[in-house]
Image (tube, rainbow, N blue to C red):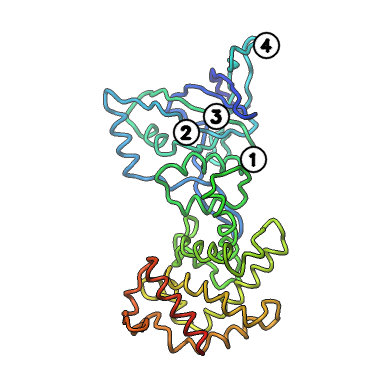
Amino acid sequence: MVRKVKIPAIKYIQNGKKLYSMVVDGKEISKIASVTRVSRDQYELFGYQRPEIVNHISEIREYLESPTAMLPNSIVIAFDNRVTFKPRGGSRAKRGHVVPGTLEIPVIEERGMRCGWIVDGQQRTAALREADLKTFPVSVIGFITNKTNEQKEQFILVNSTKPLNKDLIYELLPGVDTKLNNTLTKKIGPATIADMLNNESDSPFYGKIKRPTNPNGVISFNSVLKMLENSLTNGLLFEFADLSKEKNLRTIKKILFSYWGAVAEVFPDAWSKIPRLSRLTHGTGLVAMGFLMDAVYSNISFKDRDAKAQIINELEPLNPLCHWTKGSWDFGGEIREWNSIQNIQRDMGLLTNYIIHTYNSN
């Protein structure tokens, strides 16, 4: 029989969602909740937490072991529906905005099978677990859901205003249904397409985009997002920006796979190197070649079966004139060494103008 811990709690409602406020011994949290970290199988994202920051945890632990330590901020835990709330005093238990009662939580020893997932407070929980303390009560806010998306939504909303790796936030966006701020909303489309580019084996970007779930990638996630945002906002992909239509996503896949596949074949050496050794896989090169995509597709149809072969023919004349890995760029009187091109607006403009002018002149 599974043992249950019974914790006094109060229930209250925000915008139709039930929340539970309680005080839990910080040393006991790891028995009822796990930390989920970002990982993937071939296609799907699992988990949503950052890797534990060792130095940060150590600092919190030292503070907790001091005689004046206090942790007033609540730890947020998402519970599944194995957790139940029993009000105290029957149907008339409500007092103002709250209902007092007891939260009953099964204690499962296996980490992956526990009923709770820590949405906010990973480092604090780790520090509490490791601290040389017999007990340390902390405030906990819980909510009950079996929807992974709701857990991810709360993680994004809690952490998007903190100094958090933005790549992690952007990677979590696809599949989130809640209303987000405008900045995050604009990233959903590009992030969804970036998922496709990085995860599908026939993509020229397959496994190359560096993200929290793919730390061995070499191309900056943010650079790919910027390239995609440009096209979705004012370029070729704008017409297909409604990704709720499966047909649009298929069209975008064909456009991008054909174009960037051609780029990889025309510039194989530059495409195979890391950004430090190649300005093609560098943010500036990706943005410039992203703008060139519109010019190239003005001369061919993405619907053609041999679109990629046609694009290769369009790009070939650029090969000797692009200095991705050696030599110098001649920007109309301004000579720049290949590796002096930086990921700044001015250099992006210089390189984009050069690439498009050179393409149109050949």
* 35 to the left or right of 15: left
Between the C-alphas of marks 2 and 3, the distance is: 14 Å
Looking at the rendered structure, which numbered label has been put on residue 90? 4
Q: Quadrant of residue 78?
A: top right
Between the C-alphas of marks 1 and 2, the distance is: 21 Å
Residue visible at 34% across and 25% down in the picture = 70
Residue at mark 1: 147
Residue 231, image x, y percentages: 56, 66
Q: Earlier in the sequence, mark 4 or mark 1?
A: 4
Figure check: 129 above or below 356: above
Looking at the rendered structure, which numbered label has been put on residue 107? none
Asked which secondary structure carries label 1, the reply is loop
Q: Residue furthest front?
A: 333
Residue at mark 2: 30
Along the line of sight, the residue nearer the viewer: 310 or 72: 310
Asked which secondary structure carries label 3, the reply is strand
Residue 229, image x, y percentages: 54, 62
